[in-house]
Amino acid sequence: MSATTRPGGRSARVRASVHHAVEELLAEGQQTETLTLPAIAARAGVHPTTLYRRWGSLADLLAEVASSRFSGNVVVPDTGSLRDDLATWAEHVATDLADPDVVALMRANLGCGVDGGSVCVADREEQLTAILDRERSRGGNPPTPEHAADVLLGPLYYRALFAGGLAEPGWPATLVDNLLTPAGTPA
Amino acid sequence: MSATTRPGGRSARVRASVHHAVEELLAEGQQTETLTLPAIAARAGVHPTTLYRRWGSLADLLAEVASSRFSGNVVVPDTGSLRDDLATWAEHVATDLADPDVVALMRANLGCGVDGGSVCVADREEQLTAILDRERSRGGNPPTPEHAADVLLGPLYYRALFAGGLAEPGWPATLVDNLLTPAGTPA
């Protein structure tokens, strides 16, 4: 009954093979109806009981995979200018969202219930806040994180999920222009 | 083998009870793992074979339910002013997205595969285009539908899916201000 997580131990190996199985099944275009804990267990070569005991539900497992996948894979740039920081970062986010595996994992999490979305964007919102905070520490007057998320992350995720893909190169930078050349009521 | 759709006939009754079963199960917070064609058939009181024969897959059934639900339930306003038309419409969209059943149906569709999103927003994009076209017919110079979708629908859907809900009343109107008081490069 040693359920402790020892790096390199059995627990870590099970975790890695289960995460890998989820990513493989998603990449193969498994619909939600067939992406189940037993199917993942079969692919990972572990007993289904292990998955139920350790993750409890598909939603919890998918959230963990998303949390690993979406953590720390976008570097927060520091160019010295808010506009360039945001434009560089927005291009990175757009590149990430152009990866079908990323979108598949996001869709699977959204399909899994009420909190399936927040785990996908938590890191992005933290990075955005960090960029805005740095501008404030430079003496600038950046927009609020909420407004910046509306103007930048809103269109990026909307297009990735609903419009079947992102736009031409350079489009993310125009979102930054929308944000920094402020409109009537930038809230 | 009469699979024709006769209004009020058996086919229409089956369709209605199946759609109703999907909506009930979603409202009860069924996770994707338990929202399956057999579960829907049991709730609707029809044989699972009927569902497999008629809809083929959960994705196709969910897309049909979404298509019925998201069609024609937002009136395109005609106030005589582009700003007021858009603000009224954006408030309607926000009200719709504040309904947990709407978000649950959208999440289920997104979870179901590559095209699960477009059915959720096709009507919204048409309505938006209609509002912009009317402004053009008034002699105005409205933004493109793509840019308007980025600025209006992007934040509305981002907040509904990822930020756990929409914002204060009046927020949708500020999105319209963002759109109509144009920034540097409105693309």
Image (cartoon, coloured by chain):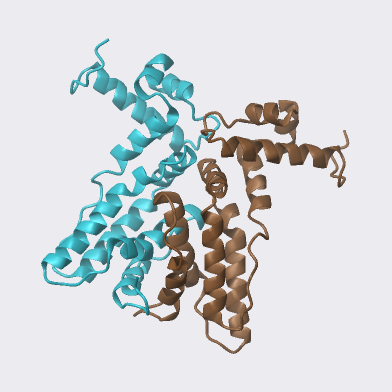
Chain colours: A brown, B cyan
Quarter assignment of residue A3: top right
Where does residue B134 sit, x and y in percent of width and height?
15, 62
Q: At 20% across and 56% down in the image, what residue appears?
A: B76
Q: At 34% across and 43% down in the image, what residue appears?
A: B119
Residue closer to the observer: B27 or A17? A17
Tell me if residue A3 comes above or below residue B18 in the rendering: below
Tell me if residue B159 comes above or below residue B12 in the rendering: below
Q: At 40% across and 77% down in the image, what residue appears?
A: A186
Where does residue B115 sit, x and y in percent of width and height?
41, 41
Residue closer to the observer: A97 or B165? A97
Of all residues, the one furthest to the bottom in this rendering is: A139
Tell me if residue B183 comes above or below residue A15 in the rendering: below
Q: How many marks?
A: 0
Where does residue B82 sit, x and y in percent of width and height?
20, 69
Whether residue B79 is visible here, answered yes or no, is no
Q: Looking at the figure, which quarter contains the C terminus of chain B?
A: bottom left
Of all residues, the one furthest to the front in this rendering is: A169
Where does residue A120 sit, x and y in percent of width and height?
58, 53
Whether residue A136 is visible here, answered yes or no, is yes
Question: Would you say B141 lies left or right of A1 here?
Answer: left
Q: Looking at the figure, which quarter contains the N terminus of chain B?
A: top left
Of all residues, the one furthest to the left in this rendering is: B138
Residue closer to the observer: A42 or A87? A87
Tell me if residue B59 comes above or below residue A184 in the rendering: above
